[in-house]
Amino acid sequence: MEQTAALKEIAQQIAVCQRCELHKSRKNPVPGAGPATAEVMCIGEGPGFYENEQGLPFVGASGKFLTHLLQQGGYQREQVFITNVVKCRPPENRDPQVDELAACAHYLDRQIELIDPRIIVTLGRFSMARFLPDVRISQVHGKAGYVDGRLIVPMYHPAAALHNPNLRSVVEADFAKLPGLIERANQRIQKIKEEAARLEADQTDQDNPAVQLKLF
Ligand code: URA
């Protein structure tokens, strides 16, 4: 199935999902938004009040700040796929619970698999923990690393910077690193492709009887 259609199908599954208690209090599920071919994927925590009203991710105050941060990184928000670790609003914006995170993980896994982004930006500790369970965000924010073959960059949640003005310039500086990180990720992929092509060419040579017989 084509990527966009497959993402729509996931959104439809989320719309009728009853895997955890959050479905009971949601107004609208918030599957995520953005192009199926996005090179950057941002993963937040869970929908808040405005997201629950509109069925769209990051449309409130932290969303406005996220739009600004992405611009710092050279991206328009429309170029980025934005989603959350839980797709329905936790009541009163409480932290998502372990069983809710587990119930929703399958949808996020499928979205990542389909979009296959060059880089995943985690926003806040709940989405960071999905990839880096044993680290503190204060130690790793803005640093990129490969987890299961995917480039992950943990960032502070935009809301944290709105609540703590000292974090604002830190988060802005972290997002400004995005173009350099993408460039490095692209170079790495190019190298892997070249190496694969070289190995294939070597193999073809070895399958050639003229080479096997050392004929000139
Ligand atoms: N905070 C999040 O983590 N996600 C949203 O979609 C909105 C606010």
Image (cartoon, grey):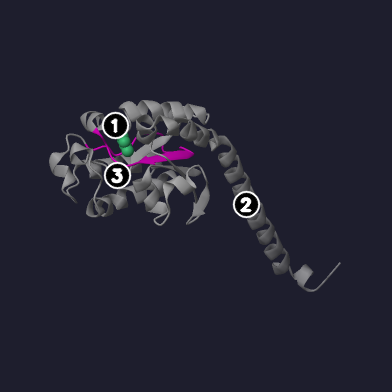
Q: CA distance from mark 2 to mark 1?
A: 37 Å
Between residues 41 and 93, which one lies in front from this camera angle? 93
Residue at the image point whose x is 38% and y is 36% from the top: 82
Look at mark 3 in the image and give the residue it sits on.
Answer: 10
Q: Which residue is mark 2?
A: 193
Identify the image quadrant of residue 29.
top left
Expressed as whole percent of the image width and height from the top left, the position of residue 25 reads 14, 39
Q: Position of residue 107 (x, y in %)?
A: 31, 48
What percent of the width, then of the height, locates residue 106? Answer: 31, 52
Residue 40 magenta-highlighted: yes
Of the two numbered discs 1 and 3 in the rendering, the one whose residue sits closer to the viewer: 1
**Seen in the image, is 191 located left or right of residue 34?**
right
Q: Helix, strand or loop at disc 3?
A: helix
With respect to residue 185, does 160 lie above or below? above
Pick the quarter of the image with the C terminus: bottom right
Tell me if mark 2 has few (under 14), some (14-19) or many (20+) residues whose alpha carbon lies within 10 angstroms of its own. Answer: few
